[in-house]
Image (spheres, rainbow, N blue to C red):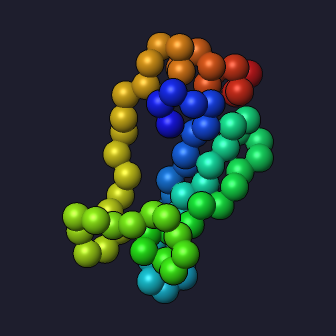
Amino acid sequence: RHGTNTYVMMYDVFGITPNNMGFSETTDFVNFKDIGRFNDPGSPMKALNFKQPKHGAVMAITLDEAKRLEGFFR
């Protein structure tokens, strides 16, 4: 999330009907907080411009963000 030290991981949820996309937040890539799935009751994650979940997409990050992420995986 731009301007914060929080990142959101989006992942496929298969095998649980209906298939969906799940989301978790992290600040350290060790501890993750579940923030819900598309359109689940109580979840802040809402599908606003489509009827069912779609796959995620690659997005650009800044060079500073990339350097910071590299540090988590060494």
x, y (%) of residue 51?
25, 75
Total marks placed:
0
Quarter of the image with the C terminus in it: top right
Q: Residue at the right extreme?
A: 30
x, y (%) of residue 7?
57, 39
Q: Residue at x 28, y 65 (%)?
A: 48
x, y (%) of residue 21?
46, 65
**Image quadrant where residue 60 sits:** top left
Q: Residue at the left extreme?
A: 49
Q: Examine the rendering and report whether any part of residue 21 can be seen.
A: no
Q: Examine the rendering and report whether any part of residue 35 can be seen.
A: yes
**66 above or below 14?**
above
Q: Nearer the viewer, residue 11 or 37?
A: 37
Q: Nearer the viewer, residue 44 or 27?
A: 44
Q: Residue at x 44, y 18 (%)?
A: 62
Left or right of 16 on screen, residue 72: right
**Image quadrant where residue 71 sits:** top right
Left or right of 49 on screen, residue 67: right
Left or right of 58 on screen, residue 34: right
Q: Nearer the viewer, residue 58 or 65?
A: 65
Q: Nearer the viewer, residue 74 or 22?
A: 22
Q: Residue at x 73, y 35 (%)?
A: 28
**62 above or below 44?**
above
Q: Residue at the bottom extreme?
A: 17
